[in-house]
Image (cartoon, rainbow, N blue to C red):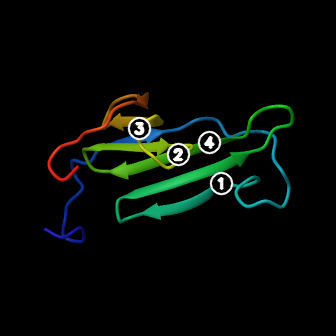
Amino acid sequence: ASVMDRSFSDVTETVVTTVAPTTTVPDQPCTTEWCEVELGTECELKYIVNYPVDEPSSITMDLTCEGNSWIGIGFSVDGKMDGSEAVIAGAGQEPRKYHLGGKWFGPGG
C-alpha cells in the first residue's frame, strides 16, 4: 500500500530529545529558534545550533519517525563512514552512541 493508504493505528515512535541550549549567536539561522526539516513522508528533524563562549559548538536534535523501525544519524570529520560516530535507536529503545570502525568489502565493495 502507498503511504497515503496506510493505516497508522499500530504505529510507535522513537524520539531522541535533549534540552535546548541557552547560549546562542544572534542573527544566525537555527540558533535562537528550532529549525524543522521533513525527511521523507514519515520523519521530521528539529534542531538548534549552540555556539557557547569558551566551549565547543554543539547541535541539539529531535528526530521523530512514524513506524516500527530504527532511526540513526551519523557524524564524520572527513565524510567517510569508517572512524565516524552515529546515534541509533529502534522503536521503543533508548538511543545509543556508536563509533563506526569497520568496513565491509563484499561483492562490489
Q: Secondary structure at mark 3?
A: loop
Q: Compared to 72, does 3 lie above or below? A: below
Q: Are marks 4 and 3 in contact (CB under 8 Å)?
A: no
The mark that comes first in sequence, 4 or 1, is: 1
Q: Name the residue beneath numbered marker 3.
A: 82
Could you say where residue 7 lies in the image, as x and y percent from the top left? 20, 60
Q: Secondary structure at mark 1?
A: loop
Crowdedness near tag 3: few (<14), some (14–19) or many (≥20) residues, C-alpha within 10 Å: some
Q: Name the residue beneath numbered marker 4.
A: 60
* Residue type at tag 4: Thr
The mark that comes first in sequence, 4 or 3, is: 4
Separation of residues labelled 4 and 1 (CA atoms): 9 Å
Look at 42% across and 29% down and name the residue there. 98
Could you say where residue 104 lies in the image, as x and y percent from the top left? 25, 39
The mark that comes first in sequence, 2 or 1, is: 1
Q: In this rendering, would 73 be left or right of 17?
A: left
* Residue type at tag 2: Asp
Q: Name the residue beneath numbered marker 1.
A: 34
Could you say where residue 93 lies in the image, as x and y percent from the top left? 34, 30
Look at 19% across and 64% down and name the residue there. 6
Q: Are marks 2 and 1 in contact (CB under 8 Å)?
A: yes
Q: Name the residue beneath numbered marker 2.
A: 62
Of 99 and 101, which appears nearest the observer?
101
Separation of residues labelled 4 and 2 (CA atoms): 7 Å
